[in-house]
Amino acid sequence: MPTQANKKIIASIDFGTNTFHVIIAELDSAVISRILGRKRWFAFLNRSKDDFIIDDAVSDAKNIAHEIAAFIKPFAVSETYGVATEVFRAKSNGKTLLNDISRIINAQVDLLSGQEEAKMSFLGVNALLDPAITNYLLVDIGGGSTEFIRAYKSEMLFNASFKVGLSMLEQHIDFKGQLTEHQIDKTYDFLDLHLKELFAANQDLQLILNGGSAELFHKILPFQAANEFTQVFGIEDVSDLCRRLLYSEEAERANIDWIPDARNYLMPVFLMQVQYLIERFKVTKVVYTPASIKEGLIMHKN
């Protein structure tokens, strides 16, 4: 464990709609020097179209919070940061659940706005992305919302948050495990309605995808490792994968060993959204980084 005065160990937690993420990071002079631990839990809080988080999901979330507290404990962290996102904003009992989670982990959990989500995501990516990636569109595809950040080098040119996350799309098209042509057309129309204002000014860029299902790309696709936190994929490789699995059945995907069970169900919805982004924004490269809100929260607090 670090002993110098300018070093400390931080736990950073992102409570999302579908997943809860934790990283344990060592900071040296307010810069992330090492990731000491990382873990993810699948919560899937948006399980119904009701305006509240259903009881089973609330119970699961609290149980996961206890597991998070146990995971953090051995690291003897000096500070714990937490943030929550779309489902906690949108559901009537979201803030009550958030207060319960805060008590369980014994730390304050801040409820972010959509634009604050985008800012945190950018800060995390900017801190760890290879500096050679300079002109890009960062798209943080979440469960409840998706954040869009246009950046040049270390400057964020604009950010926007839209309620077009995977769970929102799932409910909008009544997805049941396998996509149809009608559902794809309906999704494209829905996304166009929300995002068309972004098209003209954001063409021929590198697309940065962070966290979520994009982490699975490196398990099957060739990539160039620009640094420890940056993987660059060919656009045709990504598009071919999207097209190959777009209409796949849930049982078929269950036999693909690089797709974990928790990612299986919504995988076609994710790939459909990636293919949409490639087509509409005329993307030149796809880049994956694990850096996201949790790393951005650390940078924001320090």
Image (spheres, rainbow, N blue to C red):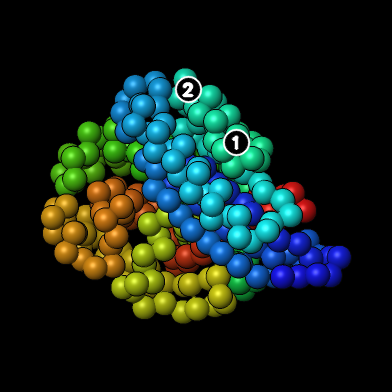
Q: Nearer the viewer, residue 158 or 221?
A: 221
Expressed as whole percent of the image width and height from the top left, the position of residue 88 reads: 50, 31
Q: Which residue lies under the disc numbered 2?
A: 93
| Residue drawn at 79 percent across, 66 percent down | 7
Kindly state the secondary structure of the residue where label 1 is placed: helix
Q: Could you tell me how many numbered marks the image carries?
A: 2
Q: Nearer the viewer, residue 100 or 231?
A: 100
Mark 2 or 1, closer to the camera: 1
Q: Which residue lies under the disc numbered 1?
A: 102
Q: Horizontal placement of 252 versus 92: left or right? A: left
Expressed as whole percent of the image width and height from the top left, the position of residue 24 reads: 61, 60
| Residue drawn at 19 percent across, 45 percent down | 177
Please say if 48 is above or below 142: above
Please say if 207 is above or below 231: above
Q: Horizontal placement of 292 versus 223: left or right? A: right
* Mark found first going from the N terminus, 2 or 1: 2
Tell me the kind of residue under disc 1: Ser
| Residue drawn at 13 percent across, 59 percent down | 252
Expressed as whole percent of the image width and height from the top left, the position of residue 129 reads: 60, 67
